[in-house]
Image: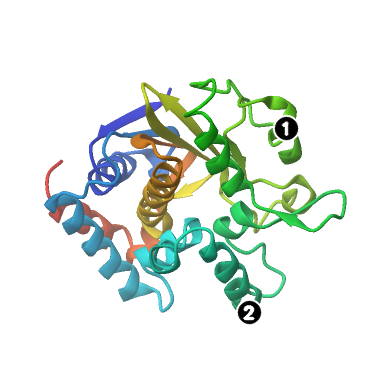
Amino acid sequence: MAKIVPSEGVGRAWLAAARHLDTQRGRKDRNLVLEISKPQALSGEDLTIIRAVDAKLREHHDDLSIETVSGTIFPNSLYRREGRPQFYKSFVEVMAVGKKPNSWGTYALRMINRVDRKGKGTYNPLDSIVERLLKTHTGKTYQAAYELGVVDIHDDFDTNLNGYGFELPLFDPSRDAKPTNVPCLSHLSFKLTDGKLDLTAIYRSHWYCMRALGNLVGLSQLQSFVGKESKYECGTLTCIATHAYLDSESFGGVPATTTLLTGLPVT
Protein backbone atom coordinates (compact mmCIF):
# COMPACT_ATOMS: atom_id res chain seq x y z
CA MET A 1 0.00 0.00 0.00
CA ALA A 2 1.34 3.43 -0.91
CA LYS A 3 2.39 5.86 1.81
CA ILE A 4 1.49 9.43 0.91
CA VAL A 5 3.36 12.30 2.55
CA PRO A 6 1.79 15.74 1.96
CA SER A 7 3.83 18.86 2.71
CA GLU A 8 4.36 22.43 1.58
CA GLY A 9 8.17 22.39 1.41
CA VAL A 10 10.87 20.04 0.19
CA GLY A 11 12.71 19.91 3.51
CA ARG A 12 9.63 19.12 5.56
CA ALA A 13 8.49 16.51 3.03
CA TRP A 14 11.89 14.79 3.19
CA LEU A 15 11.91 14.78 7.00
CA ALA A 16 8.42 13.30 7.30
CA ALA A 17 9.29 10.58 4.77
CA ALA A 18 12.66 9.83 6.42
CA ARG A 19 11.00 9.51 9.83
CA HIS A 20 8.48 7.12 8.32
CA LEU A 21 11.25 4.97 6.83
CA ASP A 22 13.04 4.95 10.20
CA THR A 23 10.06 3.02 11.64
CA GLN A 24 9.86 0.43 8.85
CA ARG A 25 11.44 -3.01 8.80
CA GLY A 26 14.88 -2.70 7.26
CA ARG A 27 14.15 1.05 6.96
CA LYS A 28 12.62 0.33 3.54
CA ASP A 29 9.22 0.86 1.95
CA ARG A 30 7.47 0.57 -1.40
CA ASN A 31 5.64 3.34 -3.26
CA LEU A 32 6.52 6.26 -1.01
CA VAL A 33 4.77 9.31 -2.48
CA LEU A 34 5.67 12.90 -1.60
CA GLU A 35 3.15 15.61 -2.55
CA ILE A 36 4.82 19.01 -2.19
CA SER A 37 2.47 21.93 -2.77
CA LYS A 38 5.01 24.81 -2.66
CA PRO A 39 8.34 23.26 -3.65
CA GLN A 40 10.07 26.54 -4.52
CA ALA A 41 9.14 28.26 -1.24
CA LEU A 42 11.64 27.44 1.51
CA SER A 43 10.44 28.11 5.05
CA GLY A 44 12.75 28.49 8.02
CA GLU A 45 12.12 24.84 8.86
CA ASP A 46 12.97 23.76 5.32
CA LEU A 47 16.27 25.66 5.43
CA THR A 48 17.15 24.22 8.85
CA ILE A 49 16.56 20.68 7.57
CA ILE A 50 18.52 21.25 4.36
CA ARG A 51 21.49 22.71 6.24
CA ALA A 52 21.52 19.86 8.77
CA VAL A 53 21.44 17.17 6.09
CA ASP A 54 24.07 19.01 4.05
CA ALA A 55 26.38 19.15 7.09
CA LYS A 56 25.89 15.43 7.74
CA LEU A 57 26.68 14.55 4.12
CA ARG A 58 29.83 16.68 4.15
CA GLU A 59 30.86 15.07 7.45
CA HIS A 60 30.83 11.56 5.99
CA HIS A 61 31.52 12.12 2.27
CA ASP A 62 34.34 14.13 0.70
CA ASP A 63 32.52 14.92 -2.54
CA LEU A 64 28.85 14.95 -1.56
CA SER A 65 26.51 17.79 -0.58
CA ILE A 66 22.97 18.97 -1.21
CA GLU A 67 24.32 21.19 -3.98
CA THR A 68 26.29 18.45 -5.77
CA VAL A 69 23.27 16.11 -5.70
CA SER A 70 20.79 18.78 -6.84
CA GLY A 71 23.18 19.73 -9.63
CA THR A 72 22.85 16.27 -11.17
CA ILE A 73 19.17 17.08 -11.73
CA PHE A 74 19.54 20.67 -12.88
CA PRO A 75 22.58 23.03 -13.10
CA ASN A 76 20.75 25.90 -11.45
CA SER A 77 23.74 28.17 -10.77
CA LEU A 78 24.84 27.92 -14.41
CA TYR A 79 21.31 28.68 -15.62
CA ARG A 80 21.01 31.70 -13.32
CA ARG A 81 24.37 33.01 -14.52
CA GLU A 82 24.01 32.43 -18.27
CA GLY A 83 20.29 31.97 -18.92
CA ARG A 84 18.55 29.95 -21.59
CA PRO A 85 19.70 28.83 -24.12
CA GLN A 86 23.39 29.55 -23.49
CA PHE A 87 23.63 27.42 -20.35
CA TYR A 88 22.76 24.30 -22.38
CA LYS A 89 25.93 24.62 -24.45
CA SER A 90 28.09 25.52 -21.46
CA PHE A 91 26.86 22.56 -19.44
CA VAL A 92 27.53 20.08 -22.24
CA GLU A 93 31.05 21.49 -22.61
CA VAL A 94 31.69 21.21 -18.87
CA MET A 95 30.42 17.64 -18.77
CA ALA A 96 32.57 16.67 -21.76
CA VAL A 97 35.57 17.39 -19.54
CA GLY A 98 34.20 16.53 -16.11
CA LYS A 99 32.15 13.37 -16.71
CA LYS A 100 33.68 10.28 -15.18
CA PRO A 101 34.94 7.75 -17.78
CA ASN A 102 32.52 4.91 -18.56
CA SER A 103 29.73 6.54 -16.56
CA TRP A 104 26.26 7.47 -17.77
CA GLY A 105 26.78 11.11 -16.76
CA THR A 106 24.05 13.09 -14.99
CA TYR A 107 20.30 13.36 -15.33
CA ALA A 108 20.72 16.96 -16.48
CA LEU A 109 23.00 15.86 -19.32
CA ARG A 110 20.44 13.29 -20.47
CA MET A 111 17.72 15.93 -20.42
CA ILE A 112 19.54 18.40 -22.66
CA ASN A 113 21.85 16.34 -24.84
CA ARG A 114 20.61 13.11 -26.41
CA VAL A 115 22.03 11.36 -29.46
CA ASP A 116 19.64 11.13 -32.40
CA ARG A 117 18.88 7.49 -33.22
CA LYS A 118 19.19 8.24 -36.95
CA GLY A 119 22.74 9.51 -36.57
CA LYS A 120 21.82 13.15 -37.16
CA GLY A 121 23.66 14.64 -34.21
CA THR A 122 22.05 15.44 -30.87
CA TYR A 123 18.83 17.04 -29.67
CA ASN A 124 17.56 18.69 -26.49
CA PRO A 125 14.46 17.01 -24.97
CA LEU A 126 14.19 19.51 -22.11
CA ASP A 127 14.09 22.52 -24.41
CA SER A 128 11.58 20.69 -26.61
CA ILE A 129 9.25 20.56 -23.60
CA VAL A 130 9.73 24.26 -22.91
CA GLU A 131 9.00 25.17 -26.52
CA ARG A 132 5.95 22.92 -26.67
CA LEU A 133 4.56 24.40 -23.46
CA LEU A 134 5.10 27.90 -24.82
CA LYS A 135 2.91 27.02 -27.80
CA THR A 136 0.01 26.11 -25.50
CA HIS A 137 -0.50 29.82 -24.77
CA THR A 138 -1.69 30.36 -28.32
CA GLY A 139 -3.10 26.92 -29.16
CA LYS A 140 -4.97 24.09 -27.51
CA THR A 141 -3.83 23.21 -23.99
CA TYR A 142 -3.72 19.61 -22.76
CA GLN A 143 -3.69 18.96 -19.03
CA ALA A 144 -2.19 15.46 -19.10
CA ALA A 145 -0.71 12.86 -21.39
CA TYR A 146 -2.04 9.69 -19.72
CA GLU A 147 1.31 7.96 -20.23
CA LEU A 148 2.81 4.70 -19.05
CA GLY A 149 6.34 5.80 -19.80
CA VAL A 150 7.30 2.50 -21.42
CA VAL A 151 7.68 3.63 -25.03
CA ASP A 152 10.95 4.64 -26.66
CA ILE A 153 12.14 8.15 -25.85
CA HIS A 154 11.94 9.12 -29.53
CA ASP A 155 8.24 8.21 -29.63
CA ASP A 156 7.61 10.59 -26.73
CA PHE A 157 8.93 13.43 -28.89
CA ASP A 158 7.23 12.45 -32.13
CA THR A 159 5.87 15.62 -33.74
CA ASN A 160 2.61 13.79 -34.52
CA LEU A 161 1.71 13.86 -30.78
CA ASN A 162 0.45 17.42 -31.27
CA GLY A 163 0.82 18.54 -27.69
CA TYR A 164 0.12 15.28 -25.87
CA GLY A 165 3.74 14.75 -24.89
CA PHE A 166 5.33 16.85 -22.13
CA GLU A 167 7.24 13.72 -21.07
CA LEU A 168 10.92 13.49 -20.17
CA PRO A 169 11.99 9.83 -19.97
CA LEU A 170 15.50 9.26 -18.66
CA PHE A 171 15.91 5.47 -18.69
CA ASP A 172 17.73 4.34 -21.84
CA PRO A 173 17.22 0.59 -22.41
CA SER A 174 20.24 0.36 -24.70
CA ARG A 175 22.58 1.57 -21.95
CA ASP A 176 20.79 0.91 -18.66
CA ALA A 177 19.60 -2.70 -18.96
CA LYS A 178 22.15 -3.79 -16.36
CA PRO A 179 21.65 -4.95 -12.76
CA THR A 180 23.95 -2.28 -11.29
CA ASN A 181 25.12 1.28 -11.96
CA VAL A 182 21.90 2.44 -13.57
CA PRO A 183 20.00 5.72 -13.04
CA CYS A 184 17.54 5.70 -10.14
CA LEU A 185 15.35 8.43 -11.63
CA SER A 186 13.25 6.74 -14.29
CA HIS A 187 10.81 9.33 -15.60
CA LEU A 188 9.71 12.95 -15.37
CA SER A 189 6.23 14.09 -16.32
CA PHE A 190 5.10 17.71 -16.63
CA LYS A 191 1.38 18.43 -16.44
CA LEU A 192 -0.79 21.54 -16.72
CA THR A 193 -3.39 21.69 -13.94
CA ASP A 194 -5.66 24.73 -13.65
CA GLY A 195 -3.06 26.88 -15.37
CA LYS A 196 -0.15 25.70 -13.21
CA LEU A 197 2.78 23.47 -14.10
CA ASP A 198 3.00 20.27 -12.03
CA LEU A 199 5.97 17.92 -12.06
CA THR A 200 5.95 14.22 -11.19
CA ALA A 201 9.21 12.32 -10.76
CA ILE A 202 9.32 8.52 -10.59
CA TYR A 203 12.26 6.76 -8.98
CA ARG A 204 12.88 3.05 -9.30
CA SER A 205 14.98 3.36 -6.11
CA HIS A 206 15.58 6.30 -3.79
CA TRP A 207 18.23 6.46 -1.06
CA TYR A 208 16.91 8.95 1.46
CA CYS A 209 20.08 9.85 3.37
CA MET A 210 22.54 10.17 0.52
CA ARG A 211 20.35 11.44 -2.32
CA ALA A 212 16.68 12.18 -1.70
CA LEU A 213 16.78 15.71 -0.25
CA GLY A 214 19.31 16.93 -2.82
CA ASN A 215 17.17 15.37 -5.54
CA LEU A 216 14.08 17.18 -4.25
CA VAL A 217 15.94 20.50 -4.31
CA GLY A 218 17.12 19.78 -7.86
CA LEU A 219 13.62 18.79 -8.99
CA SER A 220 12.16 21.99 -7.55
CA GLN A 221 14.78 23.99 -9.47
CA LEU A 222 14.06 22.08 -12.67
CA GLN A 223 10.33 22.72 -12.25
CA SER A 224 11.04 26.40 -11.62
CA PHE A 225 13.15 26.61 -14.79
CA VAL A 226 10.51 25.00 -17.00
CA GLY A 227 7.76 27.12 -15.43
CA LYS A 228 9.64 30.38 -15.85
CA GLU A 229 10.75 29.70 -19.41
CA SER A 230 7.31 28.46 -20.52
CA LYS A 231 5.49 31.28 -18.67
CA TYR A 232 3.59 29.06 -16.23
CA GLU A 233 3.32 29.34 -12.47
CA CYS A 234 4.63 26.24 -10.73
CA GLY A 235 2.20 23.91 -8.98
CA THR A 236 2.73 20.63 -7.15
CA LEU A 237 5.91 18.57 -7.15
CA THR A 238 5.19 14.86 -6.72
CA CYS A 239 8.02 12.41 -6.05
CA ILE A 240 7.25 8.68 -6.21
CA ALA A 241 9.82 6.16 -5.02
CA THR A 242 8.77 2.64 -5.95
CA HIS A 243 11.54 1.53 -3.57
CA ALA A 244 12.62 3.88 -0.78
CA TYR A 245 15.52 3.16 1.58
CA LEU A 246 16.82 5.09 4.59
CA ASP A 247 20.52 4.38 4.08
CA SER A 248 21.61 5.24 7.62
CA GLU A 249 25.19 4.19 6.87
CA SER A 250 25.48 7.36 4.79
CA PHE A 251 24.90 9.42 7.96
CA GLY A 252 27.26 7.44 10.18
CA GLY A 253 24.94 4.62 11.28
CA VAL A 254 21.47 4.03 12.73
CA PRO A 255 21.92 5.87 16.06
CA ALA A 256 23.38 8.95 14.34
CA THR A 257 20.57 8.98 11.77
CA THR A 258 17.82 8.61 14.38
CA THR A 259 19.37 11.38 16.49
CA LEU A 260 19.41 13.70 13.47
CA LEU A 261 15.81 12.95 12.54
CA THR A 262 14.46 13.40 16.06
CA GLY A 263 16.42 16.61 16.61
CA LEU A 264 15.13 18.42 13.53
CA PRO A 265 12.03 20.69 13.61
CA VAL A 266 8.70 18.94 14.08
CA THR A 267 6.73 18.82 10.82
Residue 233 disc label: none
Q: Residue at x 58, y 75 (%)?
A: 94
Check disc 2: other Cα within 10 Å, few if <14, some if 14-19, many if 20+.
few
Q: Position of residue 227 (x, y in %)?
A: 40, 42
Residue type pointed to by label 1? Thr
- Say which quarter of the image contains residue 233: top left
Provide the residue designation for mark 1.
159
Query: Residue 60 versus residue 249: which sits nearer the camera?
Result: 60
Q: Residue at x 61, y 55 (%)?
A: 112
Of marks 1 and 2, which one's residue comes earlier in the chain?
Answer: 2
Residue type pointed to by label 2? Val
Provide the residue designation for mark 2.
97
Q: Residue at x 23, y 37 (%)?
A: 8
- Say which quarter of the image contains residue 36: top left
- Say which quarter of the image contains residue 166: top right
Compared with residue 247, is residue 235 higher up or lower down, i.e. above or below?
above
Q: Quadrant of the N terminus?
A: top left
Q: Position of residue 64 (x, y in %)?
A: 41, 71
Q: CA distance from mark 1 to mark 2?
A: 33 Å
State if disc 2 and disc 1 touch (CB < 8 Å): no
Residue positioned most to the front: 138
Q: Residue at x 52, y 35 (%)?
A: 133
Disc 1 versus disc 2: nearer the observer: 1
